[in-house]
Image: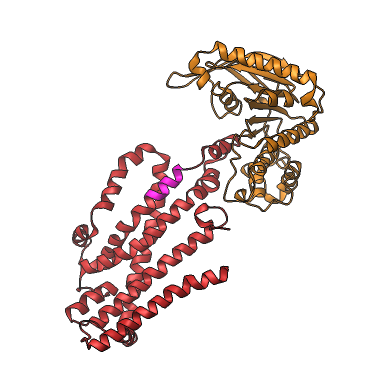
Amino acid sequence: MAATPLVELANVGKTYQRGAVALAGFDLRIGAGEFVSLLGPSGCGKSTALRMIAGLSQPTSGTIRRAWDHQASPSAGTDCRVHWSHPLGCVFQEPTLLPWTSVWNNVYLPLRLRGVSKAASKGQVDEALTLVGLQGFEQAYPRELSGGMKMRASVARALVTRPQLLLLDEPFAALDEITRLRLNDDLLSLWRERRWGALFITHSVFESVYLSTRVLVMSSRPGRVVEEIVVDLPEVRTAETRTSVRYNDLCRRASLALERATADAPSAGRSA
Amino acid sequence: MNERSLWIRIGAPALVGALLLAAWEAWVRYAELPKYILPTPSEVASTIVAQWAALGPAWMVTLKTMLVALAAAVVLGVALAALFASSRIVETSLFPYAVMLQVTPLVAVAPFIVIWIGWERVWLTQLVCAWIVAFFPILSNTTMGLRSVDPGLRDLFSLYDASRWQRLRLLLAPSALPYFLSGLKISANLALVGAVVAEFVTGTQVDNPGLASTIFTSQLNSDTPLMFAALSLISLTGIVTFFAMEGLSHLLLRRWHESAIGER
């Protein structure tokens, strides 16, 4: 793991106003270039952890340190705005595209919110669209795309700022199996090429092992990391990876860890 | 197929209209009804032409009341909706009064407005009456639209530190647009209803009579053809308004909103 992590959560807790404890004693480090999966039963606080890293929710205890928190943001007037990179990209469970505008404008949105002109953004937006294989669909509206293509547009939007850390909250869970496998492979090859840090949230054992360099298994109520599995598979992963002994061994370990984590929790947590 | 369905959509109602007018004309002539009971369509048409010097300006008066009232309803309705959407407490405190304004029949309120604003400012009285009825659909629909923003998109805008102005322009306004437009459709025709009711309430003692005032006055003179002439201009205004609003809505929403997308 890198000496200075991109993100470090130490002893983080989150208690909601009505007293429900989502997370307690939650620790997490993501180093540069790591692909970390957070694996846990639904309702265990995975998404809460992601929202806190993204700054969309505040912890009620503990500390969150982000590598870019102390970086000076480019001062107004300097000409680095075009290449200014928002350190975070986020892909939600839903594509969350603006329905009233084109794919191109959707991918341009993060730069637009930074005040970068259309002309100056063109290179970056076109590049992001090419990365996810959406060239030719720039002028299409979201409703004209299939579910998988909408997710591709959403990934392009997250990558357009050239982030250091990409957060993915069960991004392909709503898609059919074939599309999901395809998008996972494309995501992996992008990651190998670009090497952002990634935090991938999932409740699928197989998906987490296939994608990651590290799998963190969570227990529910309150959510915390109970087991860490380092995935020492070769970096290039294919359909053959899924039949390899090592892959299946790791999946078994993750399954058992998940089972233990769910068994420890009170029964209410299991059905959540 | 598309062109054929367009012909049916325009041609079929036009044919029905023509048949009804012809039947009306034939029946009145056959039964020899006096024209103070029921004039024929051709008599109504010739009255419009003959009385144009009076009807034209009257039409403009009613049209002006309606359009200015609608514009005021849009401005104040949207402004108040923005206020409601930004603060629950403001909405909770004021909404019952907005409802009260809406559910109290205009005809019952209008005499008070006449007294408060005064006979010397009749047009302003009419304008306020039309505004009262036109205002509410825009307010309630826009408020609902501003509240129906996709929470995922809200998160996205927070993630990228969008300013208030960026949120308003790039997220809230487009999200609320379909709701606003359906409010506008209702309000536009209510503004006409309000203008007509107001003219009836303010009666005959006005310097610049509108179309409804014309109906009122010609009723006193038993000038039925003139009544029909004014009525048909009011109907025409309503029909044109309706289709103008449909067209506007279609133009703004056709690429993305389900309501404007027909079968493909």
Residue A221, percent across and down?
A: 52, 16
Please tell me whether residue B220 is drawn above or below residue A232 in the rendered image: below
In this rendered view, identify the residue nearer to me: A74 or B152: B152
Residue A78 shown left or right of residue B61 in the figure: right
Residue depicted at x 70% and y 51%: A137
The colour mode here is by chain
Residue B74 shown left or right of residue A141 in the figure: left
Write down the quadrant of residue B112 in the picture: bottom left
User: In the rendering, what colour is chain B?
Assistant: red
User: In the rendering, what colour is chain A?
Assistant: orange
Residue A117, percent across and down?
A: 67, 49
Residue B224, percent across and down?
A: 23, 81
Please say whether residue B46 is visible from this viewpoint: yes
Please say whether residue A232 is visible from this viewpoint: no
Please tell me whether residue A158 is drawn above or below residue A255 in the rendered image: below
Tell me the magenta residue range: B140-148
B10 in the magenta segment: no
Q: Main secondary structure of the magenta part?
A: helix
Please tell me whether residue A93 is drawn above or below residue A199 in the rendered image: below
